[in-house]
């Protein structure tokens, strides 16, 4: 496979991906981009890459760049991914795909018309506990799923302000606009999609550091095309410790992850015929990392697999595992959930296949 020239845009969370692309045998990291001069300087020192810019337009204008890894603020993903595709370059984007329906639509249309590869870097389908769920589901041991739920508790208060006191994008982002960690594993595993959502928002009396203009915690109840009911709870500010949790209920068995920091590694499950009738526990681990992996932080396990899948999709001219349609299926329920809170009613979720 010919090596692809890759640029990484956004060098905070993007540092994980910068170090993944930097040593991958099937690509070359050739360009770094960030509006923060200090972050850019740090990236240069760590990677040895000397071609840099402070604006995405400079990346798009460089004909030597084949693919762009976008790890920028969430509200920019839709517009920036579309611009990359329109420039004739492949794109790997952080989650969510966008924060509006129009942003998702633009990505779907631009990917189709450009013929370039788009992939959303949703990591939870690649986590060890969810890989176990996928295996059990594929074997038919859960049967038909009829209920699922997920919780995503992320304390972002420390990220709400820049050193100069100005607000960041995280300060006002509605929690349910970040739905992909919760609903992504189910959609990726089953091929189902959500068709309607009803949501509610609540806040504590004295939430620590909370913006009074934003809900403390939001809950969405979604109905899928296959008839499954899904409860998603998201919060960015809570007295409860942070963490994840996912569960799947089927007519032949059930599955759930651990809670908090055990969600990625602990799988508990029961299937019809197992005795005694109680959940079995299994500790799951990431596959061994390739020898080229260096300094990729806590997201190294799924990041390596995501980068591999992205590069293979481009090389083989095959759809990426989380392409424009699936990424929209993972993102749109959150957009519609926020609209449900505002409107006080159930909202129908559009089908990106029709775009």
Image (cartoon, rainbow, N blue to C red):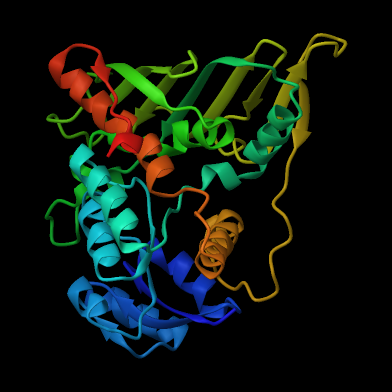
Q: Is residue 242 visible?
A: no
Which of the 4 image quarters holds residue 312? bottom right
* Residue visible at 27% across and 24% down in the picture: 337
Dividing the image into 4 quarters, which one contains the C terminus? top left
Relative horizontal placement of residue 33, taking residue 131 as reference (left or right): left
Q: Can residue 62 be seen in this view?
A: yes
Up/down of 18 relative to 81, above or below: below
* Residue visible at 20% across and 77% down in the picture: 54
Which of the 4 image quarters holds residue 343? top left
Which of the 4 image quarters holds residue 341? top left
Q: Estimate the x, y position of residue 314 in percent, counting from the top left.
A: 50, 67
Q: Estimate the x, y position of residue 137 in percent, counting from the top left.
A: 69, 28
Judge by depth and name the residue closer to the eye, 324 or 35. 324
Up/down of 128 relative to 298, above or below: above
Judge by depth and name the residue closer to the eye, 71 or 107. 107
Relative horizontal placement of residue 10, taking residue 227 as reference (left or right): left
Up/down of 214 relative to 128, above or below: above
* Residue visible at 74% across and 23% down in the picture: 140
Q: Estimate the x, y position of residue 15 in percent, counting from the top left.
A: 42, 68
């Amino acid at each position: 496979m010919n090596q692809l020239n890759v640029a990484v845009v956004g060098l905070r969370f993007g540092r994980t991906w910068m170090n993944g692309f930097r040593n991958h045998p099937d690509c070359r990291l050739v360009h770094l981009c960030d509006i923060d001069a200090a972050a850019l300087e740090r990236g240069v020192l760590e990677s040895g890459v000397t071609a840099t810019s402070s604006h995405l337009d400079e990346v798009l204008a460089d004909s030597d760049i084949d693919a762009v890894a976008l790890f920028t603020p969430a509200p920019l993903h839709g517009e920036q991914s579309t611009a990359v595709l329109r420039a004739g370059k492949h794109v790997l984007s952080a989650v969510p795909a966008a924060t509006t329906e129009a942003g998702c639509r633009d990505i779907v249309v631009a990917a189709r018309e450009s013929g370039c590869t788009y992939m959303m870097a949703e990591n939870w389908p690649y986590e060890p506990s969810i890989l176990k769920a996928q295996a059990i589901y594929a074997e038919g041991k859960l049967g038909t799923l009829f209920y699922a739920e997920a919780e995503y508790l992320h304390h972002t208060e420390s990220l709400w302000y820049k050193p100069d006191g100005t607000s960041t994008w995280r300060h006002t982002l509605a929690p349910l606009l970040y739905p992909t960690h919760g609903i992504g594993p189910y959609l990726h595993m089953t091929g189902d999609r959500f068709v309607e959502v009803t949501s509610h928002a609540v806040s504590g009396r004295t939430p620590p550091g909370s913006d009074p203009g934003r809900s403390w915690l939001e809950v969405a109840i979604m109905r899928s095309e296959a008839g499954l009911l899904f409860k998603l709870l998201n919060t960015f500010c809570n007295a409860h410790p942070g963490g994840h949790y996912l569960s799947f209920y089927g007519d032949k068995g059930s599955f759930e992850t651990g809670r908090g920091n055990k969600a990625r590694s602990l799988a508990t499950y029961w299937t019809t015929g197992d005795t005694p009738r109680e959940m079995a526990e299994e500790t799951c681990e990431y596959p061994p990392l390739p020898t080229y992996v260096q300094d990729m932080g806590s997201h190294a396990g799924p990041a390596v697999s995501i980068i591999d899948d992205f590069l293979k999709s481009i090389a083989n001219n095959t759809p990426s595992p989380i392409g424009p349609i699936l990424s929209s299926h993972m993102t749109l329920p959150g957009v519609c959930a926020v609209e449900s809170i505002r409107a006080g009613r159930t909202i129908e979720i559009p089908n990106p296949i029709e775009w």
